[in-house]
Image: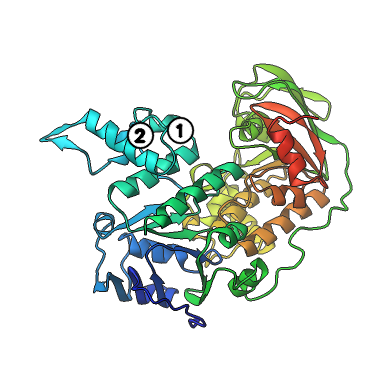
Amino acid sequence: MVASAKLVSSPMQPFLQVVEISKMFPGVQALDAVNVDIFPGEVHCWIGENGAGKSTLVKILAGSMTPSSGQIRISDEIQDISSPHHAQQLGLSFIFQELSVVNGLSVADNILLGNELSRGPLVLPKASFVRAKELLMRIGFGSLDPNRKVGQLSTAEKQAVMVARALNIDAKVIFMDETTSTLDRDEVENLFSVIRTLKSEGRSIVFISHRLNEVEKIADRITIFKDGGIVGTYNSGELSINGMIRKMVGRDIEHTFPTKNRTFGKSVLEVKNISTAKISNVNLAFQSGKITGIAGLVGSGRTELMSALFGLDRLTAGSISMGGELQRFRNCRDAIRAGIGLVPEDRRGQGIIGLRSVEENISITWAIGKPLRSWKRDSVVLAKKFISGLSIKTPSMGKQVGQLSGGNQQKCVVARWLAVAPGILLLDEPTRGIDVGAKAEMYQIIDQLAREGMAVVIVSSDLPELLGLADEIAVMREGLFMGMLGGDSSEEEVMSLAMGEVK
């Protein structure tokens, strides 16, 4: 158990109190006598490594999991939250990284989902439009058309729909779990503006994030989780980012980014004037031993470039060559055979197979075309090798990968490609949703792959991450390649190119 070393007092009555909450799974103490309180009109940030207990507590408060012991008090009344609908009735709303929107419905329908304005069995479309517009205007998204299909919106706009939904039910506490991980810098600022508006109305925001620079900027109070307990709760400004890290991981993490004294080899892959439905006339070359970053705002074509290189998007013009030989990728299987691997942006949707074991997730690509008998025998040896080599924390190789922390899931996806030894590895947002300690480990893995002669390509929305890792940075804007910068460039130089300010 981690004791509550420091509790910050307040003269106000908390709206929500978590009192001595514990949660036991078979063989695992996920939460151990946790105490947290949420006051009206505050931004309360929760931080901690993956597996520290944050998500378990959120699930208990959302009514999707029952605590083993302890109490939840709302307005000083004990509540047994029996379901997500019950949580909503109590004034709690939740916005997760995987947004709970229905893409086929309109903005208005999504905002009023479950609380429709109706006369008898008939929904009132005009009244729904007016109500949705009013809610969107309150959070600065008045230009968003309530009749638009949500599937046509950006991630930031979908988040605005979720915030408007929370306002529609008059939520008193809004939980935001890794909501900035898919946003660019301007969109994060817009979200923070919305948070300040909600705070001014007396609503509370529980902001859960691994981006400590954002926590430092937006928090009124910070609660640090570790090993299922609480290290302490601190007022804004009491801890530096390094101080937060020490409290989270129990040690200093020095030299987060490896040094860049790498040796480059021959060109592994070249693209000449390639175009798809989403990108146009891109020219790039990737060398062995070099880490190439791909920068740009959300929607700039970064992920679409990776999809083209991996055979997921059909080329409409241009060529791809490897080792001087032209390649025609009809699909991703052709790209894999040519020696290309891709760790996708959407780890849960496209990376891991959540209900399958760690062993199966690591060996699935390696096993293609192998006899069943050989696969059964050798996949165990393979999985053991990478579980050890990448320090994947799992109770067994038979554990469902979806039950591991985000950082360990990501290591399993990386291991899948290392098992087939590609010549070039494409990494799209490789550290999204993983904690600061796991990030440092991932950076070391990426650096080691490059030093062993692999060409590595990284897309990241985190500019310090790109600048800390990459030997060079290709900048994209609106599907176009804007230029190449050195890894010693500044954030301002990258952003200038990304915004089309070519000098």
Label 1 or label 2, whichever comes before in sequence order: 2
In the rendered image of this protein, does residue 129 appear above or below residue 184?
above
Which of the pair 472/45 is nearer the observer? Answer: 45
| 304 w.r.t. 238: above or below | above
Numbered circle sitting on residue 107: 2
View extreme (top): residue: 317
The picture places residue 23, in percent across and down from the top left corner, at: 38, 73
Question: The C terminus lies in which quarter of the figure?
Answer: top right
Task: Locate residue 164: give its quadrant.
Answer: top left
Image vertical order of residue 34 relative to residue 95, above or below: below
Q: State whether residue 379 appears in this view.
A: yes
The secondary structure type at the circle numbered 2 is helix
Query: What is the distance, in whole Å, between disc 1 and disc 2 at their CAs?
Result: 9 Å
Q: Which mark is residue 153?
A: 1
Tell me if residue 339 can be seen: no
- Taking depth in this image into account, of 375 and 143 the one nearest to the observer is 143
Q: Few, some or many C-alpha atoms within 10 Å of disc 1 (few <14, some 14-19, many ≥20)?
A: some
Callout 1 touching callout 2 (CB < 8 Å)? yes
Residue drawn where x is 59% and y is 73% of the image? 238
What's the colour scheme? rainbow
Asked whether 431 or 308 is in front, the reply is 431
Where in the figure is residue 424, as x and y percent of width and height? 74, 40
Q: Amino acid at mark 1?
A: Leu
